[in-house]
Image (spheres, rainbow, N blue to C red):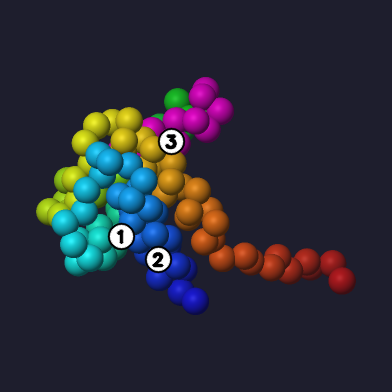
Amino acid sequence: MNTLLVRTLANLVAIYAASALLPRVQLSDVGSLLIAALVLTLINLLVRPLLLLLTLPINLLSLGLFTLVINTWMVILAARFVVGLSIQGFGTAFLTGILVSILNLMFQPRTRHRSFIR
Protein backbone atom coordinates (compact mmCIF):
# COMPACT_ATOMS: atom_id res chain seq x y z
CA MET A 1 0.00 0.00 0.00
CA ASN A 2 1.20 3.50 -0.70
CA THR A 3 2.93 5.16 2.25
CA LEU A 4 1.06 8.44 1.76
CA LEU A 5 -2.26 6.60 1.79
CA VAL A 6 -1.31 4.69 4.95
CA ARG A 7 -0.31 7.93 6.70
CA THR A 8 -3.58 9.56 5.65
CA LEU A 9 -5.58 6.61 6.98
CA ALA A 10 -3.64 6.71 10.26
CA ASN A 11 -4.33 10.43 10.59
CA LEU A 12 -7.99 9.84 9.78
CA VAL A 13 -8.30 7.22 12.51
CA ALA A 14 -6.36 9.42 14.97
CA ILE A 15 -8.51 12.50 14.36
CA TYR A 16 -11.69 10.45 14.61
CA ALA A 17 -10.48 8.82 17.84
CA ALA A 18 -9.52 12.21 19.27
CA SER A 19 -12.96 13.61 18.45
CA ALA A 20 -14.59 10.59 20.09
CA LEU A 21 -12.38 10.58 23.21
CA LEU A 22 -11.71 14.27 23.83
CA PRO A 23 -14.71 16.56 24.35
CA ARG A 24 -12.82 19.66 23.17
CA VAL A 25 -12.15 18.20 19.71
CA GLN A 26 -15.16 18.65 17.46
CA LEU A 27 -15.78 17.55 13.89
CA SER A 28 -18.73 18.86 11.94
CA ASP A 29 -19.08 16.00 9.44
CA VAL A 30 -17.31 13.16 7.63
CA GLY A 31 -16.11 15.47 4.86
CA SER A 32 -14.28 17.59 7.43
CA LEU A 33 -12.69 14.44 8.81
CA LEU A 34 -11.41 13.43 5.37
CA ILE A 35 -10.09 16.91 4.63
CA ALA A 36 -8.48 17.19 8.07
CA ALA A 37 -6.68 13.86 7.60
CA LEU A 38 -5.40 14.91 4.19
CA VAL A 39 -4.32 18.36 5.42
CA LEU A 40 -2.54 16.90 8.44
CA THR A 41 -0.75 14.40 6.21
CA LEU A 42 0.43 17.16 3.86
CA ILE A 43 1.54 19.37 6.76
CA ASN A 44 3.46 16.48 8.30
CA LEU A 45 5.02 15.77 4.91
CA LEU A 46 6.03 19.34 4.05
CA VAL A 47 6.32 21.48 7.20
CA ARG A 48 7.28 19.03 9.95
CA PRO A 49 10.72 18.04 8.56
CA LEU A 50 11.72 21.69 8.29
CA LEU A 51 10.61 22.39 11.87
CA LEU A 52 12.43 19.31 13.12
CA LEU A 53 15.61 20.53 11.44
CA LEU A 54 15.26 24.06 12.80
CA THR A 55 14.60 22.88 16.34
CA LEU A 56 17.25 20.17 16.35
CA PRO A 57 19.31 21.70 19.20
CA ILE A 58 16.24 21.99 21.45
CA ASN A 59 15.20 18.49 20.49
CA LEU A 60 18.62 17.10 21.37
CA LEU A 61 18.63 18.88 24.72
CA SER A 62 15.17 17.54 25.55
CA LEU A 63 16.12 14.03 24.40
CA GLY A 64 13.46 14.10 21.68
CA LEU A 65 10.55 15.23 23.83
CA PHE A 66 10.29 18.52 21.93
CA THR A 67 9.01 16.46 19.00
CA LEU A 68 5.72 16.19 20.91
CA VAL A 69 5.45 19.99 20.91
CA ILE A 70 6.12 20.05 17.16
CA ASN A 71 3.39 17.44 16.65
CA THR A 72 1.07 19.66 18.68
CA TRP A 73 1.87 22.60 16.42
CA MET A 74 1.11 20.47 13.35
CA VAL A 75 -2.30 19.52 14.77
CA ILE A 76 -3.07 23.17 15.61
CA LEU A 77 -2.02 24.23 12.10
CA ALA A 78 -4.24 21.58 10.52
CA ALA A 79 -7.17 22.72 12.68
CA ARG A 80 -6.64 26.30 11.48
CA PHE A 81 -6.88 25.23 7.83
CA VAL A 82 -9.89 22.90 8.11
CA VAL A 83 -13.20 24.65 8.64
CA GLY A 84 -15.07 21.73 10.23
CA LEU A 85 -12.36 20.81 12.77
CA SER A 86 -12.21 22.60 16.11
CA ILE A 87 -9.55 21.91 18.72
CA GLN A 88 -9.83 24.05 21.84
CA GLY A 89 -6.71 24.51 23.91
CA PHE A 90 -3.06 23.55 23.75
CA GLY A 91 -3.52 20.57 26.08
CA THR A 92 -6.18 19.07 23.86
CA ALA A 93 -4.00 19.60 20.80
CA PHE A 94 -1.10 18.02 22.72
CA LEU A 95 -3.15 14.90 23.49
CA THR A 96 -4.34 14.78 19.88
CA GLY A 97 -0.73 15.06 18.70
CA ILE A 98 0.28 12.16 20.94
CA LEU A 99 -2.60 10.10 19.56
CA VAL A 100 -1.60 10.97 15.98
CA SER A 101 2.01 9.99 16.72
CA ILE A 102 1.05 6.64 18.26
CA LEU A 103 -1.29 5.71 15.43
CA ASN A 104 1.19 6.78 12.77
CA LEU A 105 3.77 4.57 14.46
CA MET A 106 1.33 1.66 14.58
CA PHE A 107 0.30 2.05 10.93
CA GLN A 108 3.87 2.51 9.72
CA PRO A 109 4.65 -0.12 7.11
CA ARG A 110 7.23 -2.68 8.14
CA THR A 111 10.23 -2.78 5.86
CA ARG A 112 12.61 -5.64 5.47
CA HIS A 113 16.19 -4.54 5.46
CA ARG A 114 18.36 -6.38 3.04
CA SER A 115 21.75 -7.40 4.14
CA PHE A 116 24.65 -7.00 1.77
CA ILE A 117 26.39 -9.89 3.47
CA ARG A 118 24.87 -13.22 2.55
User: For the residue carrying disc 1, how many other residues have a C-alpha within 10 Å: few (<14), some (14-19), or many (20+)?
Assistant: many
Kindly tell me whether residue 18 is visible in this rendering.
yes
Q: Which residue is mark 3?
A: 68
What secondary structure predominates along the stretch shown in magenta? helix
Badge 2 vs badge 1, beta-carbon distance below 8 Å:
yes
Badge 2 or badge 1: first in the primary sequence: 2
Query: Magenta stretch?
Result: 61-74
Going from N to C along the chain, the mark reached first, 3 or 1, is 1
Q: Mark 3: which amino acid?
A: Leu
Of the pair 87 and 59, the residue shown nearer to us:
87
Q: Amino acid at mark 1?
A: Ala
Q: Is residue 95 left or right of residue 31?
A: right
Disc 2 is placed on an element classified as helix
Q: Position of residue 99 (x, y in %)?
A: 43, 46
The residue at 49%/30% (across/down) is: 65
Quote the CA–CA distance across marks 2 and 3: 20 Å
Q: Residue at x 44, y 41 (%)?
A: 98
- Specify the quadrant of the image occupied by residue 9: bottom left
Structural distance between the alpha carbons of marks 2 and 1: 7 Å
> For numbered disc 3, what is the local secondary structure?
helix
Q: Is residue 50 visible?
A: no
The reply to whether callout 2 and callout 3 are in contact (CB within 8 Å) is no
Q: Residue at x 18, y 62 (%)?
A: 29
Q: Which mark is residue 37?
A: 1
> Residue 8: where, in percent of width, then height?
37, 64
Q: Is residue 115 above or below residue 91?
A: below
In the displayed structure, 89 sits above or below 1; it is: above
Q: Identify residue for label 2.
A: 9
Q: Amino acid at mark 2?
A: Leu
Which is nearer the N-term, disc 2 or disc 3?
A: 2
Q: CA distance from mark 3 to mark 1?
A: 18 Å
**For this rendering, which residue is in front, 49 or 66?**
66
